[in-house]
Image (cartoon, rainbow, N blue to C red):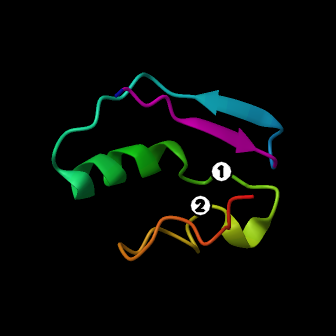
Amino acid sequence: MPIIPVAFDFGTKTVKIGDVFYPTSNYENDLKFLLCHFKDVSGKIQKYGFNSENNYSGEYVLKVPFL
């Protein structure tokens, strides 16, 4: 199933739309590749953003509950 990464950067008031990505069986490499799209993007709630101070640690992707 293809994935199109989309990042809403509230800091620059822009939307980044990435190329279509087809996941492989290598979860860690796929996740590293996808997270590069979100590098230094300022989210609406800063503490949940992906920046140089709050990078993916390998334990979880997001702590935000989905409503």
Query: Circle 1 is placed at which residue position?
Result: 41
- Residue at the far left: name it: 25
Q: Residue at x 75, y 58 (%)?
A: 67
Amino acid carrying label 1: it is Val
- The label on residue 50 is 2
- The location of residue 20, given as percent across then percent down, is 41, 22
Residue visible at 52% across and 35% down in the picture = 5
From the viewer's perspective, is 53 left or right of 36? right
SS assignment at label 1: loop
- Quarter of the figure with the N terminus: top left
The range drawn in magenta is 2-10
**57 to 30, vertically: above or below:** below
Magenta span includes 61: no
The tag on residue 13 is none
Q: Earlier in the sequence, mark 2 or mark 1?
A: 1
- On whether residue 6 falls in the magenta region, the answer is yes
Q: Circle 2 sits in a helix, a strand or a loop, which is it?
A: loop
Vertical placement of residue 5 versus 64, above or below: above
Residue type (three-letter) at the residue carrying disc 2: Phe
**Residue situated in front as seen by the camera: 8 or 60:** 60
53 to the left or right of 28: right
Q: Residue furthest top?
A: 20
Q: Quadrant of residue 28?
A: bottom left
Label 1 CA crowd tier, 10 Å (few <14, some 14–19, many 20+): many
Q: Are marks 2 and 1 in contact (CB under 8 Å)?
A: yes
x, y percent for residue 65: 68, 67
| Real-space Cα separation, disc 2 to disc 1, in angstroms | 6 Å
Q: Dividing the picture into quarters, in which one does residue 56 lie?
A: bottom left
